[in-house]
Amino acid sequence: MFNLSFLNSAILSGLVAALIPVIIHFFVKYRPKMVKFSSLKFIKKIHQNKARYIKIRQLLLLIIRILIILLVILALARPVIKDLFTSENWQNHAPTTTAIIIDNSFSMNYLLKNKTGLVCAKDRAKAILDMLSEKDRIMLLTLTPKFNNKHKYFTDKAEIRQELESISITDNPARLQDIIISADEELQKIDEINKEIYLLSDNQAYNWQSLNFDKFELTSDLFVMNPLNSGEETSNLATLSAAHIPALLTSNGKPKVKAVIKNFSNQKQEDILVSLNVNNLTKAEKAISLNGNQKKSVVFDLNIHSTKNSFGDVSIKDQVLPDDNKWYFNYDPNKKPKILLTTNKPVKREFAAALDLITNGDWDLVAPQALALQDIEQHQLLILYKLEEISAKLKHFLAEILNKDKSVMLVPNAKAPGDNLSKWLQQEGAQLQNLTREDSEVNYVNYLHPVTSILTKEMFSKVRINKMWKSKTKGFSPLIGTPSGALISIKDKLLLCSINFEPGWTNLASQPVFPVLIYNIANFLGRYDSDLQTYEVGSPFAIQDKGELKCKLPNGETLPLLVEHKNSENFTRTDWQGHYFIYSQDDRLRKIVSYNTSRAESNLSRLSQKEMEDIESHSSQIHFLNNKTWKQRILTSRYGYGLWKILLWTILALLIIEMLLAYSGKWSFKKSK
């Protein structure tokens, strides 16, 4: 049975206008003109001959006028028919405007049966092109904004086939929701019956879980296909982190590199070769085995003389998905953090000893009321230690510090923050709500952040928390947490502690992990070019030099830079994993910045059938297609040619008939006279 739909269904309410001729016919009576005759025999004769003809003609006129009104309303409502097409007559659809979105995030580089997901997606895109005719218009998009900016136009099939070959894997994909909404907006600018979006993706769960359905209202049909949907279990190994550990923090007094490797499959993986590469040379290799879903730390002795501005990576050999095999890092053990601590209270011995160890005693202490602008300029990290209140001048300094890409660390007191301190914290998105005295232990460590990347929950196994502030934060990432909340959280260069590192609060300061934690915090926040600082692709970094410079990108390209003022510019072309080298014009190396992509796709966790059904329930425009029936689903969802042309010709024919009937009545009346 035909599936009739109306593109402008709201106009159908005008069908009630078909009652107008009926109302006129029954309620509007024309009074006949009185004519005097000497005899009624002629009137009776006319009545007998014409009465039946007049009734039939009036009934036909009434029906025709009703039909004209109905058909005009139906034509304006633009009726179309679905379910008429098969693979044999697929070209019989109305003009179609299509956007094809290729997921080119790194998980699409997964190799299965000698083909990657990206290659399979390109093959599926070509099959979709074969289902379009020459009158259709197509646009090709990816998760790479730069590609989309160059290809954000509608073209024909031949050009799209050429553009497909230029798509490659990106380290810095855009949000899936943003690309879909952008495609839908472009489609709405085109006045065609059929508007279709095809998303060719491996359906990574994290992509869809971040969708905000309150802001995801589509007007076009979105067809989602996983061209790699083989039903086979996927396997992947990934390097989750790597960092330089200075000799100061190691048990044997020698520098090390610590990395974390994970097996994301359910099967045991043996003889995994892990390599340490420093300054483009392989310095060490180890073979490890990992059980299913196991994560393991691998530690290398750094048996080389560490020079200034060294860089390296830890890599594994995994050909199934190579894009998360390496983790890049850089280090310079000769530099010390620049730390300034301000307080009116005595600094506890454990905390001061940790700062002495990290800086060789080269840190400064100043009272809040004596703090000057010169102090701010000479230091990178300001520690607010047990302050209950801040002055208006200090509040101004804090704003200046964060604006200049410097850092602030807050260590709380047992008393609630005063008005100025509370207002400043609220301005930054944080609140210290109430002080609790519930005994707890550490149950969370954020191994993805540079501060805690070399730490594990096991290192905190003997740490007990006796007193802590319950904090409410917005935009902060927890670094270390307990069942009661976050112990330490961070937002950009603002680090918020919920505890004081002294007895009565916690025994953390007496544990071996404490100097490691403080070292990581101090070097991450207290140095302009921290060896712990690794960036996620796409985020900018500050150029802390001035003059004529140049930057060598991970892809080998070199870009000239002109910086007029120190710390005045950010470098934004950071779309690739790897090392970015800043040189002066005389080729002296000034800075190394290491970038890694998020490992959110490494587990290859895809949407379940139930999750896909839940997404479809949120939007009637979203359709997940399987690899067996996808062609038929697309064909039967398209609209055929609009019926409005047929309706207009029918209306024209009815108008001619109506005029002929109307004039035939006048003609017969004249003849009868």
Image (spheres, rainbow, N blue to C red):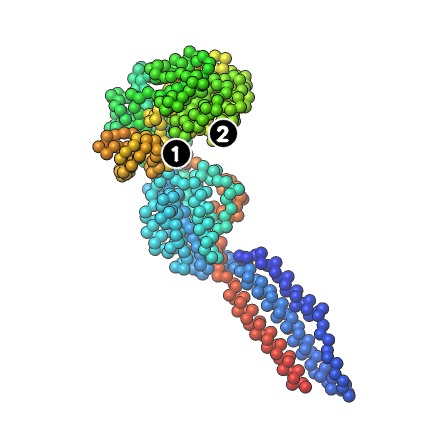
Q: Secondary structure at mark 2?
A: helix
| Rendered view: 399 above or below 148 | above
Which residue is the site of mark 1? Answer: 598
Residue 59 seen in the figure: yes
Q: Amino acid at mark 2?
A: Gln
Indicate the position of residue 422 as horizontal and vertical percent values. 52, 24
| Camera-nearest residue between 370 and 156 | 370
Quarter occupied by the C terminus? bottom right
The residue pinned by badge 2 equals 427
Q: Amino acid at mark 1?
A: Ser
Q: Earlier in the sequence, mark 2 or mark 1?
A: 2
Where residue 142 sits: x, y (%)? 39, 45
Instruction: Give the x, y percent position of residue 27.
Output: 72, 68
Looking at the rendered structure, the secondary structure element under dot 1 is loop
**Mark 2 vs mark 1, CA separation in Å:** 29 Å
> Which residue appears farthest toward the left when viewing the image?
586
Which mark is nearer the camera, 2 or 1?
A: 2
Residue drawn at 54 percent across, 66 percent down: 647
Q: Mark 2: few, some, or many residues within 10 Å (few <14, many ≥20)?
A: few
Q: Is 606 left, or right, of 15 in this rendering? A: left
